[in-house]
Image: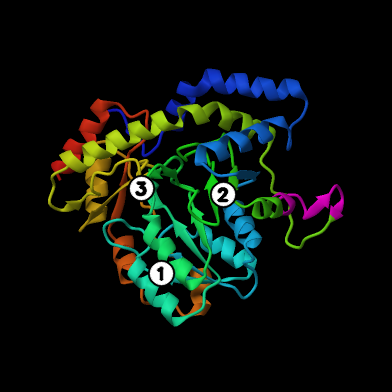
Amino acid sequence: MADRIAVNDLRRHAITTEATVRTSAERVLSSGWYVLGKEVEAFEREFAEYCGVGHCVGVASGTDAIELGLRALGVGRGSRVATVANAGFYTTTALMALGAEPVFVDVERETKLMDLAHLKQILGETTLDAVVVTHLFGLLHDMEPVLDLTDRAGVPVFEDCAQAHGARRGGRAAGSFGAAASFSFYPTKNLGALGDGGAVVTGSADVAQSVRRLRQYGWGSRYRAEIKGGRNSRLDEMQAAILRAKLPLLDGWNRRRRDIATRYSREIGNPRVDRPPVHGEEYVGHLYVVVSDDREALRAHLAEASILTDVHYPLPDHRQPVLAAHGGRTGLPVTDDLSAAILTLPCYPELSDEEVTRVISRVNSW
């Protein structure tokens, strides 16, 4: 039996980064300082520079980054926030924690990103307090037309960049377009820690200061709580040091992901499998997602050859049981259609050329 090809293989990734990660971990251990110290400060400075923004605030997870970032923009109980329903429920989780109401926007069939025609319709029909734009699967949305719509409506944009570290359009990085943006450093992300971690990036000193207070009990100074909504949500020194070690390698990993995705898009020729188009720097290959008329049969065909797949994501937010009281919300036909047909193929920097060829051959033989 052929060796298994995983959707993502963190063991391989650990081997390629072991030496630099060990050095970083040892530096933290010898420092005797483990929370909100020099490593976090340095990572925040370096990641802000990488994203081309003035400020970065490390927090405990990507979902916390969404919640605290939106809270810093004034989103709270009763707020209405536009978002997509095909991105794994993370933004909706944050909105529920804030007491805000998600207003779901359908997606474009090819890009799987927010449909701006539908967003324009919603903006014309209702008042929104924010729009969350998710750069899904590693593809940075075309932000100029997004901002054209939202600026005219006077609505702030928050970018969810959890899957788009390093994606760029016109020389600008994901996270540098909106009023603020969130990142996740979950281990499977393009820039991953050895546990949970996240960050809010922004060009606003006021937003950054609010998030810094919110991540630590709402303190203005030690033991003095000054703003509501605070909690313990801090990026620790160990994760920050590891992220610092990996950050200089991120662009190279992204190029490799993009090269693999390009091969898939060009060389998979099965007419029953729709592939994404070939992209440039606006895509960093976090996930390579195809669309099939019989997903489960394709999954089984690949599994027989020890090629693993996944579905990102099988149940859209508006169909989640926790939102049943909202009546199952209809009106997202493309989101619903895609959820029954999408399939994620292996795509990560450590895949060999031979393994990529094997995946392509197996898909084409179906």
> Disc 1 marks which amino acid?
Val
Image quarter for residue 79?
bottom right
Residue 210 rendering spot, x and y as whole percentages: 70, 55
> Disc 2 marks which amino acid?
Gly
Residue 45 rendering spot, x and y as whole percentages: 62, 36
Determine which residue is flagged by label 1.
105
Determine which residue is flagged by label 3.
310
- Classify the position of the N terminus by image quarter: top left
Mark before the other along the chain sequence, 3 or 1: 1
Instruction: Check the image and report above or below for 18 versus 236.
Output: above
- Classify the position of the C terminus by image quarter: top left
> Disc 3 marks which amino acid?
Asp
Residue at 58% across, 47% down: 201
Which is closer to the viewer, label 3 or label 1?
A: 1
Determine which residue is flagged by label 2.
62
Residue 339 rendering spot, x and y as whole percentages: 33, 61
Magenta residues (range): 212-224
Crowd rating for badge 3 (residues with CA inside 10 Å; few <14, some 14–19, many 20+): some
Q: Nearer the viewer, residue 347 or 282?
A: 282
Q: CA distance from mark 1 to mark 2?
A: 21 Å
Instruction: Check the image and report above or below for 292 versus 309.
Output: below
Mark before the other along the chain sequence, 3 or 2: 2
Mark before the other along the chain sequence, 1 or 2: 2
